[in-house]
Image (spheres, grey):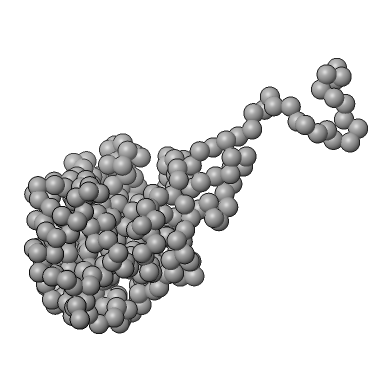
């Protein structure tokens, strides 16, 4: 009888922590082998630390029998840009099975962001393997961004997600009837507590002041904002925290943003007489509340609303959500009825790009109101 091997794919330490929490909660059946496949999706992975090199990873890796690298497996290709050609899939599967000592094992996959590579490539490579998808952020509550090949989507058995917005049902992958399953928040917070054991250089508040944790985004990299506008957004977060009486600020830039702080931001902080140590640790952005016990957390969109499982009940502030809906193409993932600006639940489930179709004002109506004269008879 062939062995059963579970392959868990993670690109971030936060994702690996989510998988660890799911394992601790007994959400995966026993298997002969459990492999953690780490992937570095950074623009320049050669100079960007991988998940398995980050502080705290050792606390998580013990749950797996072996740690593998997807980047090394497909080198010199980039994980985000490569997938096997259809005719090459049997060859790549034989190669990977030989490289990872899989033999004739029955494979079970647990991946994130199944609609894009590298998760999509892994699912295509192991044709027929059952797939569990896990979401470590708010993406689970929105519709599937891109249309997924039914040969992949119909193999997804469930969606594992954190209870970031209590009471809200995820929409991700509902077009395939995929049920969602919660990763218990208490188990996840316990795993985050393990990560704190590896953190030794956290900023120390002065005078007993609890810091305010500022979480940045990478909106300029996405083309939503200019660099100057994103810098101003961060400064608004600083001003808001100062106005609330905080004098110790901890800024965590998004990993997708190039520079952690623009040159003018530290100068602005100096003028405001606030301390702002740079929180550059790998897991500290989302694990920050557990590590720092901040009095308040301030974040830039699109992270709103603030995930409750991360915040631990602490106050949250979200900046400038209004203009986000103006700058972002309206509901770009939705399919809309051609005669209405609104959409139906079934349309939300499909990842088609929205196209607005408003009736022309010059179009004559085919029916008239009672007592109304025809158009050609009006004076």
Q: Is residue 179 visible?
A: yes
Q: Position of residue 195 (x, y in %)?
A: 18, 72
51 or 258: which is nearer to us?
51
The residue sitting at 50% across, 53% down in the picture is 348
* Left or right of residue 357, residue 314 in this image: left
* Left or right of residue 104, residue 113 in this image: right
The residue sitting at 45% across, 45% down in the picture is 352
**Image height check: is 229 above or below 195?**
above
112 or 55: which is nearer to us?
112
Q: Is residue 306 visible?
A: no
The residue sitting at 44% across, 55% down in the picture is 143
**Image height check: is 283 above or below 6?**
above
Quadrant of the image occupied by residue 215: bottom left
Quadrant of the image occupied by residue 94: bottom left
Q: Position of residue 189 (x, y in %)?
A: 29, 75
150 or 296: which is nearer to us?
150
Quadrant of the image occupied by residue 230: top left
Q: Position of residue 254 (x, y in %)?
A: 25, 52
Q: How many marks?
A: 0
Return the residue found at the far right: 371
For the C terminus, the image quarter is top right
The residue sitting at 59% across, 40% down in the picture is 338
For the N terminus, the image quarter is bottom left
**Image height check: is 285 above or below 166?**
above
Q: Position of residue 62 (x, y in %)?
A: 14, 77
């Amino acid at each position: 009888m062939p062995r059963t091997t579970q392959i868990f794919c993670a690109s971030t330490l936060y994702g690996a922590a989510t998988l660890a929490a799911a394992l601790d909660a007994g959400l995966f059946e026993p298997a002969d082998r459990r492999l953690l496949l780490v992937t570095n999706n950074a623009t320049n992975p050669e100079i960007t630390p991988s998940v398995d090199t980050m502080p705290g990873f050792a606390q998580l890796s013990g749950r797996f029998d072996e740690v593998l690298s997807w980047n090394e497996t497909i080198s010199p290709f980039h994980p985000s840009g490569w997938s096997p050609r259809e005719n090459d899939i049997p060859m790549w599967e034989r190669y990977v099975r030989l490289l990872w000592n899989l033999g004739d094992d029955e494979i079970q996959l647990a991946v994130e962001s199944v609609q894009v590579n590298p998760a999509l490539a892994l699912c295509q490579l192991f044709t027929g393997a059952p797939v569990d998808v896990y979401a470590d952020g708010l993406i689970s509550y929105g519709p599937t961004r891109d249309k997924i090949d039914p040969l992949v989507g119909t193999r997804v058995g469930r969606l594992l997600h954190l209870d970031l917005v209590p009471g809200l049902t995820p929409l991700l992958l509902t077009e395939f009837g995929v049920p969602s399953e919660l990763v218990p928040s208490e188990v996840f917070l316990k795993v985050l507590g393990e990560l704190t054991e590896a953190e030794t250089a956290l900023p120390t508040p002065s005078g007993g002041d609890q810091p305010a944790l500022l979480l940045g985004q990478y909106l300029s990299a996405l083309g939503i904002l200019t660099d100057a506008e994103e810098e101003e957004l961060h400064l608004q977060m600083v001003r808001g925290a100062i106005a609330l009486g905080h004098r110790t600020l901890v800024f965590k830039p998004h990993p997708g943003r190039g520079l952690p702080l623009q040159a003018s931001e530290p100068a602005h902080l100096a003028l405001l007489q606030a301390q702002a140590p740079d929180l550059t640790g790998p897991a500290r952005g989302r694990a920050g509340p557990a590590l720092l016990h901040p009095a308040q957390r301030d974040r830039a969109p699109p992270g709103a609303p603030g995930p409750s499982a991360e915040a631990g009940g602490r106050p949250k502030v979200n900046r400038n959500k209004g203009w986000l809906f103006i700058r972002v193409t309206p509901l770009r993932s939705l399919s809309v009825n051609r005669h209405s600006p609104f959409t139906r639940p079934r349309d939300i489930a499909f990842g088609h790009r929205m196209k607005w179709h408003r009736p022309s004002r010059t179009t004559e109506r085919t029916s008239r109101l009672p007592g109304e004269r025809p158009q050609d008879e009006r004076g």
